[in-house]
Image (spheres, rainbow, N blue to C red):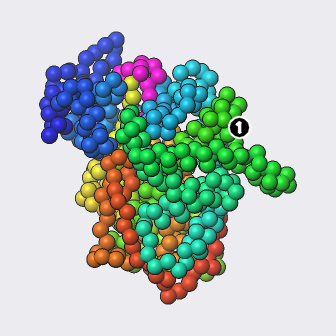
């Protein structure tokens, strides 16, 4: 078992003191140079988690071919927000340079190699926070996305079966894409664009193959189709078509202007759109699909969730407040949080720009990557209670049946380095909107015996693992029709918005 052997070997390399800081131990792989790379290819992020689980070291180093990594275990999470000289963009670049086929201009900006590039990355990050953080922005995006979700459901009103993950992808990513990229006039209005986007995103690992001949032609074609879709969409034409009186502030348009101001070429802006969709779509799509899988696999859970939901809808039959779903349907919200905990097994990280220290003593060396696998934390019984390897939404409920906020705050899926995902408020409302709409629109049943939840794919690269295969499920219309129910969103500036 390579991981065991690696842990045994590290005893050869003691913590070493250098100019007042500690150089953490190095864990060597069984096969020199490539051993950790092979472990990662085989086991995905679980490989890093296993290494953390098998050592009591707070942090340690590994080499993956020429890339040096400091793996940081949950014991040190509380120190991460205070570490200086870290950058997210260079890590994103390392992960996606080849698979997205990024051009030189984008690579230069993402590398944060000079002050200008660093400033650009900070500005984009600030813009996201401004555009996705405030309650009125979340309301605007969430209600728009709900409109598109409804029209997607209405189009398939008479379906009798669905491929679950495929359906969630088309509905949710299609709706998010339309909300951000020009609605029915943008690339996401083309069904084939969404189909190709799904092929491209689910096969990103394949696109990382340095030997182009070994990349599936279908996947290369899908990437090309998506690039062309973004390239040929013009925000100028879209804005002009909207008319001057009806100009809406558009998140993507603002990001684009920022990119152009900082010298991004047209090709660079297309790269940036590819990066954005690669970062935004897979997490929310995977989490929403897992949510439906768990509801299908546990009929008692689904019945209880439906009971709370029907009570909520019937209490205000014409419109329900999307910002109140968590309070009115705590079991649905608890299932969402449990999905994030249970399937939140990925690794977060940063590039180290300059020698710096973790907890004021462990050296993080310039040019390395600081990585934090979050599974060891998400499966720790001291934080989550008994049986952390099992799926139990009730662990997020207090004795009063409401969400246990203190426990929810232990989730680390939105970040460990201090800055959290700016889309986290929108994410939960999108997921709740989709789940509520799906539960109201259809009843679901397994087509062959009890519903079996698929395994997690080992080759997911950006965030939550996607299901390793898709499952066809039967659907039928429920006895009561709730198609007329509207969503409103009352949470405002003075109320805390849930995440
Ligand atoms: C369950 C769903 C989601 C999860 C688990 C998730 C998780 C994350 C994580 C871990 C990061 C990196 C944070 C860091 O290391 O600093 C991130 C970044 C980001 N997320 Fe999310 N995310 C989700 C949904 C969304 C959605 C729906 C949006 C927007 C529509 C979004 C927008 C972003 C953006 C723009 C960034 C980059 C932030 C920056 O450059 O500073 N995310 N997300």
Check disc 1 and report its element: helix, strand or loop: helix
Specify start and end residues of the magenta stretch as a single range.
348-367
Q: Note whether 456 is above or below 320 in the view shown.
A: above
| Drawn side of residue 143 relative to residue 390, left or right | right
Query: How many C-alpha atoms fall within 10 Å of the one at disc 1: few (<14), some, or many (≥20)?
Result: few
Which residue is drawn at the image coordinates 61% and 40% (left, top)? 270
Image location of residue 293, percent across then percent down: 37, 66
Image location of residue 114, percent across then percent down: 57, 20
Camera-side residue: 142 or 133?
142
Q: Is residue 476 magenta?
A: no
Which residue is drawn at the image coordinates 70% and 49% (left, top)? 250
The quadrant of the picture occupied by the N terminus is top left
Q: Note whether 143 is above or below 418 in the view shown.
A: below
Q: Residue furthest right?
A: 245
Q: Is residue 158 visible?
A: yes
Q: Which residue is mark 1?
A: 257
- Residue 395 falls in image quadrant: bottom left
| Drawn side of residue 198 relative to residue 45, left or right | right
Q: Residue furthest bottom?
A: 479
Image location of residue 376, percent across then percent down: 29, 45
| Drawn side of residue 20 relative to residue 110, left or right | left
Which residue is drawn at the image coordinates 29% and 40% (left, top)? 41
């Amino acid at each position: 078992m390579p991981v065991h052997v690696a842990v045994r070997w590290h005893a050869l390399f003691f913590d070493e003191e250098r100019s007042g800081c500690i150089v953490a131990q190095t864990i060597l792989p069984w096969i020199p140079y490539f051993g950790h790379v092979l472990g990662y290819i085989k086991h995905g992020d679980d490989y890093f988690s296993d290494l953390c689980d098998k050592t009591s070291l707070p942090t340690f180093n590994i080499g993956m071919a020429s890339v040096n990594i400091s793996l940081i275990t949950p014991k040190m999470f509380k120190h991460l927000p205070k570490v200086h000289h870290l950058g997210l963009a260079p890590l994103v670049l390392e992960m996606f340079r080849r698979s997205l086929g990024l051009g030189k201009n984008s690579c230069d900006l993402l590398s944060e190699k000079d002050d200008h590039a660093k400033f650009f990355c900070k500005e984009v990050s600030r813009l996201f926070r401004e555009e996705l953080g405030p309650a009125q922005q979340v309301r605007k995006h969430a209600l728009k996305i709900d409109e598109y979700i409804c029209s997607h459901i209405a189009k398939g009103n008479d379906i009798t079966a669905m491929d679950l993950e495929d359906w969630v992808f088309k509905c949710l990513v299609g709706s998010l894409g339309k909300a951000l990229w020009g609605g029915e006039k943008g690339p996401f209005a083309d069904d084939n664009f969404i189909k190709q986007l799904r092929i491209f995103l689910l096969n990103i690992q394949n696109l990382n193959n340095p030997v182009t001949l070994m990349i599936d032609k279908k996947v290369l074609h899908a990437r090309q189709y998506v690039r062309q879709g973004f390239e040929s969409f013009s925000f100028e034409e879209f804005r002009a078509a909207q008319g001057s009186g009806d100009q809406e502030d558009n998140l993507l348009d603002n990001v684009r202007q920022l990119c152009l101001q900082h010298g991004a070429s047209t090709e660079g802006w297309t790269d940036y759109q590819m990066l954005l969709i690669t970062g935004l779509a897979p997490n929310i799509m995977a989490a929403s699909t897992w949510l439906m899988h768990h509801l299908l696999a546990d009929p008692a859970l689904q019945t209880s969730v439906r009971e709370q939901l029907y009570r909520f809808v019937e209490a205000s039959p014409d419109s329900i407040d999307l910002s109140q779903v968590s309070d009115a349907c705590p079991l649905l919200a608890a299932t969402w949080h449990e999905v994030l905990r249970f399937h939140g097994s990925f690794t977060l990280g940063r590039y180290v720009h300059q020698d710096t220290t973790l907890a004021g003593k462990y050296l993080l060396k310039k040019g390395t990557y600081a990585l934090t696998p979050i599974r060891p934390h998400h499966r720790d019984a001291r934080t989550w209670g008994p049986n952390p390897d099992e799926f139990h939404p009730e662990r997020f409920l207090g004795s009063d049946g409401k969400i246990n906020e203190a426990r929810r705050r232990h989730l680390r899926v939105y970040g460990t380095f201090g800055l959290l995902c700016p889309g986290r408020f929108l994410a939960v409302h999108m997921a709740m909107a989709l789940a509520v709409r799906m539960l109201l629109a259809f009843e679901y049943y397994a087509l062959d015996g009890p519903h079996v939840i698929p395994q997690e794919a080992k080759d997911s690269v950006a965030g939550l693992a996607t299901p390793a295969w898709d499952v066809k499920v039967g659907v039928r219309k429920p006895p009561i029709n709730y198609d007329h129910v509207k969503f409103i969103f009352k949470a405002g500036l003075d109320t805390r918005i849930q995440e």
